[in-house]
Amino acid sequence: MNPLTERLAAICGAEYVSDKLVDRICHTRDCGPTPGGIPAVIARPRTTEQVSAIVAAANEFKTPIFIWGRSSTFIGHGIREGCILMGLDLMNAVEKMDFDSQIVTVQTGAIWHAVDVELNKRGWELAVPGSGGMFVCTVGGSVAYNSVPHGLAEYGMTGDNVVALEVVLPSGEVIYTGSAANRAAAGLAFERNANGPDLAGLFIGSCGVYGIITRVTYRIRQKPETERFAFYSFDSLDAAVDAAQALQRRRVPTHLVQVYAGQKPLGVEGEAFLHIVIRDGKAAAEERLAAAHSICSAFNGLRLDEKATERYWVHHMYSWLRNTPPEVYYSDRPYTCPEATAFIPTQRVKDAMRYLKEYEAEHAEEFARHGIRIKAYDVYYSRNAAFIWIDTLFPELDAEAWRYGVKMRADYSEYLWSRYGSPGGILAPLAEHIMPKLGGGYDLMKALKQTLDPNGILNPGILGLNDGNGNGRNVHEQ
Ligand SMILES: Cc1cc2nc3c(=O)[nH]c(=O)nc-3n(C[C@H](O)[C@H](O)[C@H](O)COP(=O)(O)OP(=O)(O)OC[C@H]3O[C@@H](n4cnc5c(N)ncnc54)[C@H](O)[C@@H]3O)c2cc1C
């Protein structure tokens, strides 16, 4: 055993540390197409104290840490060759359900859906149901990434519903945010906007560059009385976007998804489709549903069978968006998804979708040659804007198609980000390209990184924050 592995084994217990090649190779990438480096060792702590001790060891050995929730993102991890990979899957306890303060406190590695199931047994639920990856992704990883959850149109982003965090800083020190920061209150986490600036906000969406989230206190609510659904097709994209905006203005939907391009719902005509989910008390839901029908009709929407929307919502499966079986996309060979995404103003959805169609037409020959498939250009509407999700799939095992897919992702991202778009999760391989567009904001992020993490210990391959000395680079890009 080398001295680093030995130290980690002393902290976590030998059975929770591995430097076997097979384990290391299995921890080199997320769900996206870009692999990272191979870590030197995997360590799986079970307590905050162990996390803190690992961070202290990493500083001493000058070896960076990569934080691994369940690695279900598509951002291309930027795992540094030879790093310590800290797997947080064992820190998965649901510690406290507090129905008086309407919060739940969990260890960071708890899986969204597993937490929701515990709450559901008591008639409660998490303030957001989680992202499409809810069955695999961790609460801490989703907060660190600020994932785009179901129910975005009413409930907001994952980070909006955080009440308090416990975080291990790059120095190894443990801090608490919001009301929990006041230790005289015995760490009572019931209010985020307390004790000065919103420190939780610093860690939300920062993908672990400023600290390791070890505990999350999250909002919960009583399950609403009912869920109602509507599904509409529109002859034109513009009409669908205008209808979506009218629905946003009236605060009608809990969840509003537009489907455009790719496989159409079976047996259905139209250019663009809206799935509308409403969750509320019975009378209020009825009123909101009536408003949905009247708005969609005013934009010449054609009412379709809402069972497709209900199936999608209940099963949380992307194929249900279209009411088509998943085999259409995945039956013959493994496909991967470049996941180019961006927030854009609602009306800009029209230009962005046209650009994607033009891109498809201009590159028809390459698409055919590389077997590229368009699963969809989906739009998840928030309260006042839109989140675009470009699912253009390419065959994963074909090296040329892979290279083409990664270039396609860069083209899409360049188009969106150089005009009006802002990425949700920042793709590690594209960070160097996007972050400098942020100007002074980026300078501040770098200064904070330098101050909090002078040794570049935590996730140095992410957000391009350590690029000044070439350290932020993913090994495959150097
Ligand atoms: C089928 C499927 C559907 C999906 N649908 C969606 C969707 O609808 N919306 C969406 O936004 N995403 C979606 N995703 C992507 C992904 O599931 C989510 O973004 C999820 O939130 C990531 O959680 P994770 O635990 O896997 O995090 P990871 O991928 O492990 O980590 C995410 C980032 O945060 C860092 N990190 C992880 N844990 C911590 C921690 N405790 N403290 C500090 N930093 C940490 C990691 O280093 C990494 O940079 C989907 C994924 C799948 C597989």
Image (tube, helix red, strand yellow):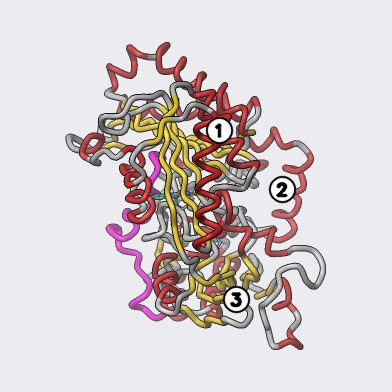
Q: Are marks 3 and 1 in contact (CB under 8 Å)?
A: no
- x, y percentage for residue 194? 78, 71
Q: Which residues are magenta?
A: 13-34
Which disc, if any, is residue 446? 2
CA neighbours of label 1 inside 10 A, class few (<14), some (14 to 19), many (20+) = many
Q: Verify CB contact (< 8 Å) between mark 2 and mark 3.
A: no
Callout 3, which amino acid?
Gln
185 lies left or right of 99: right
User: On the image, numbered disc 1 is attached to which residue?
Assistant: 243
Disc 3, SS: loop
Q: Nearer the viewer, residue 425 or 219?
A: 219
| Residue 473 can be seen in this image | no
**Mark 1 is on which residue type?**
Ala
- Image location (x, y in percent) of residue 445: 72, 49
Seen from the viewer's position, the closer of residues 157 and 82 is: 157
The residue that appears at 53% across and 73% down in the rendered structure is 51
Q: Are marks 1 and 2 in contact (CB under 8 Å)?
A: no
Question: Label 2 to label 3, Cα distance in Å?
Answer: 36 Å
User: Which residue corresponds to the image point at 40% horizontal and 13% vertical from the top-left?
Assistant: 361
Residue that appears at 31% across and 42% down: 319
Q: Secondary structure at mark 2?
A: helix
- In the drawing, what numbered circle is on residue 102? 3
Q: Specify which label sits upstream in the sequence, 3 or 1.
A: 3
Could you say where residue 298 lies in the image, as x and y percent from the top left? 54, 30
Judge left or right: residue 332 versus residue 443: left
